[in-house]
Image: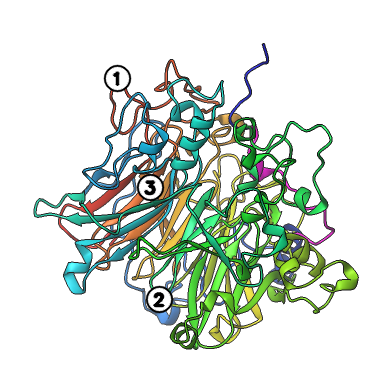
Amino acid sequence: MEAKRPVFPEYDPDDVSSNTSGNRSFGEVVQRRMSRRTALVGGTAAAAGFLAAAGLGTGTATAASGGPGDGGWQGGVRPRRLLGFSPVPTSTADEFTVPEGYETQVLIPWGTPIRPSGPQWRKDASNSAAEQAEQIGMNHDGMHFFPLGNGPAGSRRGMLVLNHEYVDQELLFPDGPEEMTAEKVQKALAAHGVSVVEVEQRGDGQWHVVESPRARRITGSTPVTFSGPVGPDHPALAAANEPMGTLNNCSSGYTPWGTYLACEENWNSYFGTEDPDWEPTPAQARYGVSASGFGYRWHEADPRFDLAANPGEINRFGWIVEIDPRDPDAKPVKRTALGRFKHEGCTVTESRGHVVAYSGDDQDGDYIYKFVGKGNWRVHRALGRSPLDHGTLYVARFDDDGSGTWLPLEHGTGPLTSANGFADQADVLLRTREAADAVGATRMDRPEWIAINPKTGDVYCTLTNGSGWDNAVNPRTPNPYGHIISWTEEGGRHTATSFSWDIFVLAGDPAYDEQVDLRQSGIFGSPDGLAFDADGRMWIQTDVSNSSQNLPERGYDNIGNNQMLAADPRTGEIRRFLTGPRGSEISGVAFTPDQRTMFVNVQHPGESTTAWGAPSPEDPRAVSNWPDFDPEGRPRSATVVIRRTDGGVIGA
C-alpha cells in the first residue's frame, strides 16, 4: 500500500522562495542602511528598528522624537493614550483569552447554516457537499462588516463577509482524505471561498445570524467572470469547464463604493497531475506550480485540477475577486488589472479621487504592489465602468538611503517589451511575478497584510518571516520572527511614485534574539494580520507556523499560541490583547462603526502541530476541541465577537 501523503508538506510552502531573479532583497537594503545609521550616530543605532522623523517606535513605550527634557514626546506634550486595557499573558492553553473587562461570543463556526433555516451542522463532519455549500466554510480569514443602516442602527445590523482560505481534509471528511472521491472534491470546494451572512445584535447584547435574501456562499464552484486586460475570452483562460470558483482566499479588502475584495493566495496548491511527461513552464515554476501541489490530490478525482488534462484552468486563479455583498445575484468578478500573484490582501484607499490598492505577494522573496486608478473613480462608476479596470500596477523598490520607488508594470515600459518576451499588457499581468523580476523590484520576507494609518496616511506592512536574503529591509538572516515596516508616500499622496520607508518593529523574543526590543507583555512572532481602527490603534495578528508553535528549538516557547496585539504607532507601545487556542492562527478583524464590537477570526484550531500532535479521523480532537468542547465533536474555525462589559470602545 502506498504510504499516506500529508495534506500539507512538513515545511511551510510560503517559506520556500520561487524567486530566482538576481534582484536585491529587502535584507540587503536594511543592512546597508543600518550600517550607515550606526556610523552616523556613533554606534548607538537601535538594532530593533529605526526611529524615523515621522515618529515610529520600537515596540516599547519609548517615543521617537522630541527635545531634551520633554519626556521624548513631540512638542513636549504626551499624546492621549490609545491602549487602555491590561495585557494578557502568553498562553499554551486550548482556550481563547481576552483582557479583564471584555467578553466574548463564538459566532458562525464552520458548518453554521448561512440562514437559520438551512442545513444544520453535523459534528461527525458527515454533511454532504450540497449541505456544505449552504453553510459557513472552513478556516475563516479576511473579513469586513458592511453596516445596514445609518447611525446606531448600522452598528447593530449588517452583512458580515469573510473568506475561507483552505481546508483541513483530516477534519473535513469523516474518514479523512485517504481515498479521494468526486464528492469529497466537491465538498472541499464548497468549504472554500467566501461567506456572506446577515447578522444583528439583539437586546441581550448577543449577535445572531438572521434569515436574509442577501445571504450566500461563493465557493470553488460558483460561476465567475473576468474583467480588465485579461478578459473572459483571453486564450490563456480557455479550459474544459466554464469559469468558476475562487480558492485560497486569504485576507481581503473593501472599496469606497461598498464592495468586498477576496484575495487568492496559494492557488497553486490545488493543482497536480500524474502525467510523467508534464513539466511546468517557466511562468508556472515562478508561481510554484508542481505536479503534486500541496498534496490535496483533487486531480485524482476531478480532471478540472489536472495540470496536463486541463492546463488553462490554473490561469483563472491568482486574482483579486470583487463581490457585491448586497446583491446575491451579482456574479463575482476577477479584476485582472490588479495583477496575478499570491495576493495576501488588498487594501484600498483613495487619493484626490483616484482609487489606490496595495497588495503583498505572500511568499519568501516576493514583492509589494500598488495599483493606482486612472481618473476619478466616481466618474468611472457613473459611466458603468469599474475603477479597478483602469489604471497602472506598480511594484516596490526599497533603496539603501530609506527612499523607495514604485516601478510601473506597463507593457512597452523598460524591459517589459515584446522583444523581451512580454506580448502585451495582458501577458504582463498573467506573468506579474516575472514582470516584477524584470524591472528590479526588491525581494521581501513574505509580505502579508497592508494597513493605512487613518490619522497620518502612513502605510504599514507585515513581513511574516523568511530566509533573510542577506539584505537590508530585512535586518536578520535568517528572519524567523518577521517584522513590520512602514512607508510615507511622497507629499502624502498615495498616487505618488516615490516614498520613504522605515522599520516599525522587529518581532521576536529577546531571550533568543538580543536585537528584539519588546517587553514580555508584547513579545510576538510572525506578524500576519494588520489593521487600524478609526482612532489609529494598530491591531497585529500572528501566524506562527504549526512547525514552530510553542517549541524552544524554534525560539517560540515563550511566545506560545498565536495572538493578537494592539500598538500605538505614535509611541511604539505594544500590548497583547488576546491569545488563541492550540493549533490556531488569529486572522481577520472587523469593527462595527461605533467601535464597540470587534469581530476576530480563529483559523484552523486543532490543526496538526509538532508540539501537540495531529488530528485524525479516529481522534479529531487530538490537538484542540475549541470552540464546542464536545467529546464527540471536532475543532471548528469560528468568528469571535468581542465587546467590553461596560459597552466602551474596543482597546481604549
Residue 127 belongs to magenta span: no
In the foreground, 270 or 468:
270
- Amino acid on which the number 3 mark rests in the picture: Asn
Q: Position of residue 276 (x, y in %)?
A: 81, 31
Residue labelled with disc 2: 257
Residue at far top of view: 1
Residue 12 belongs to magenta span: yes
In the foreground, 217 or 502:
217
Quadrant including the N terminus: top right
Residue labelled with disc 1: 631
Q: Position of residue 378 (x, y in %)?
A: 45, 86
Which colour scheme appears in the figure? rainbow
Quadrant including the C terminus: bottom left
Q: What stretch of residues is rendered in magenta?
A: 9-26
Q: Position of residue 199 (x, y in %)?
A: 24, 55
Task: Name the residue: 57% across, 34% down.
Answer: 548
Q: Earlier in the sequence, mark 2 or mark 1?
A: 2
Real-space Cα separation, disc 3 to disc 2, in angstroms? 25 Å
Q: Position of residue 487 (x, y in %)?
A: 58, 72
Task: Name the residue: 45% across, 51% down.
Answer: 541
Q: Earlier in the sequence, mark 3 or mark 2?
A: 2
Q: Judge whether 153 appears above or below 598 on screen.
A: below
Q: Is residue 236 left or right of residue 298?
A: right
Real-space Cα separation, disc 2 to disc 1, in angstroms? 46 Å
Residue labelled with disc 3: 601
Are the residues at dot 3 and dot 1 in contact (C-beta closer than 8 Å)?
no
* Mark closer to the observer (3, 2): 2
- Amino acid on which the number 1 mark rests in the picture: Pro
